Image (cartoon, helix red, strand yellow):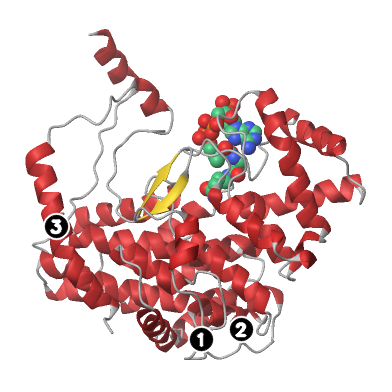
Amino acid sequence: TKTLRQALEEVIPAKQAQLKALKAEHGQAVLGDVKVEHLIGGMRGLKSMLWEASVLDPLEGIRFHGMTIPDCQRELPAAPEGKEIIAESMLWLLLTGKVPTEAETRQLSRELAEKGELPAYVEKLIDSLPTTLHPMTQLGMGVAALNHDSAFAAAYEKGIKKSEYWTYALEDSINLIARLPALAARIFRNVYNPGTPIAGINKELDLVGNYVNMLGYGGNHDLTEYLRLYISLHGDHEGGNASAHTAREILASCMDVVQANACLKDLVGSTLSDPYLSYAAALYALAGPLHGLANQEVLRWQLNMRKELGDNITHEHIKEFLWRTLKSGQVVPGYGHGVLRNPDPRFTALQEFCDTRPELLADPIIQLVKKTYDVAPDVLKEHGKTKNPYPNVDAASGCVLHHYGITQFKYYTVIFGVSRALGALTQFVWSRALGLPIERPKSLSMDAIEKLVKA
Ligand code: AMX
């Protein structure tokens, strides 16, 4: 059975050759125009980043190395007692572009379980935080603090060849992914169940199986399966989204400092160029309400709807509520997308999870999410602003957690944060394996733009 490192080693040379050929043969090919509207419109649609693991089609949705969500559900190994994709098989696919065997998946689960304990100083740090501090703020702090043990930073400080960067990047990335459940579960315990014990890591279980145990929901098979699917599906959504882009950008900026100060050896170890700090930065992008925090916002909004409108909510009632939200100048959380122009297939996959379980279909909040989906696209079309009147993944994800008893919606984005590490850290490793340079796009002032367009 191959290890993940061996599987990566096998695919890196071909990718390096592909990049070299692209640069040599098509380096000057044009992929699109840069318009003034790109500069003032959040660079929407501008093809300007290399990202290996996934590509997002506006109509079809996400493909992970060419595989759709149903392909992944069919082909990626599940947990021994489960049916849903698990984080390990998704991580393997994202990193290597290959579907892992059952044995490779189990071996990775074991490796993650063996590396999953938090260092004592991080436990102490998290335990010292006020329980009123938002769980996402705590998660970012814990992840940043883990950089104390960064193999990448330590190796860089010693002085390593550029061709070796990826091996240390991989080591840190695996350690970070392994430790995220213990960190996230500790935050949950401290904020919502202070003083209760946290389950130990079971070496025979997958990453999410252990996460559910540590959250205190061990034995809830359906919740475990839901979170396996949720965490796999949220793993990557190409590179331009705010969190993924941040992880990459921060790395690049930090490498700038490293290179600029390469002669000052004692500065190198203190640079920010390791997976922990770059992922902590990504988490704070994820914590914005237009991005990952929409997770919590959707549920808050649906619960308010229910509180206001009672139990027998009709489509007409929901329409009125939607219009009230829009007229008060707020966005409808869980709807719209920067790239997608159709219902998000991740939303569809989570809905299908509900469709096979009568107890979920009977849940009033899940029914409300479905009913909202019946009317929201038409209301948003009539409103006429959003380019995509359809639901994104956040429209569905929280209500199932709520059903299974994770009702603390401020925590929802933390689960997203445990997941997004799979994709962001995959690209971190690939950026190093491909020796990508620092990112440094050109900015212009309005005066400079006017000068250019009037010339
Ligand atoms: N409700 C009301 N108005 C919306 C809207 C929504 N759900 N989605 C977009 N709009 C508005 C925008 O605010 C913008 O208005 P403006 O011209 O007054 O500024 C206009 O429609 C055009 O926006 P767009 O081009 O369609 O979207 P975008 O690429 O600028 O933004 C997104 C995308 C996701 C931020 C936006 O659709 C939104 O705010 N959605 C609600 C929050 C949400 O669900 N976020 C989660 C996204 C997925 C994720 O990252 N987890």
The answer to which quarter of the image holds residue 41 is top left
Residue at 75%, 71% in the rendered image: 405
Residue 246 lies, with reference to residue 4, above or below; the image says above
Q: Residues within 10 Å of mark 2 (few under 14, many from 20)?
A: many
| Amino acid type, mark 1 | Leu
Mark closer to the chain start, 3 or 1:
3
Residue at 42%, 82% in the rendered image: 109
Judging depth in this view, the residue of 49 and 52 nearest the camera is 52
User: x, y percentage for residue 360?
Assistant: 76, 64
Q: Residues within 10 Å of mark 1 (few under 14, many from 20)?
A: some
**316 displayed left or right of 24:** right
Q: Secondary structure at mark 3?
A: helix
Residue 293 visible: no
Residue 237 lies, with reference to residue 385, above or below; the image says below
Q: Secondary structure at mark 1?
A: loop
Foreground mark, 2 or 1, reads: 1
Q: How far apart are the alpha carbons under marks 2 and 1?
A: 10 Å
Residue 77 visible: yes
Q: Which residue is mark 3?
A: 16
Residue 375 lies, with reference to residue 173, above or below; the image says above
Residue at 57%, 78% in the rendered image: 82
Q: How far apart are the alpha carbons under marks 3 and 1?
A: 35 Å
Foreground mark, 3 or 2, reads: 3
* Callout 2–callout 1 Cβ contact below 8 Å: yes
Residue at 25%, 60% in the rendered image: 430
Q: Which residue is mark 2?
A: 213
| Amino acid type, mark 2 | Asn
Q: Which residue is mark 1?
A: 205
Judging depth in this view, the residue of 384 and 145 nearest the camera is 384
Judging depth in this view, the residue of 152 and 370 nearest the camera is 370
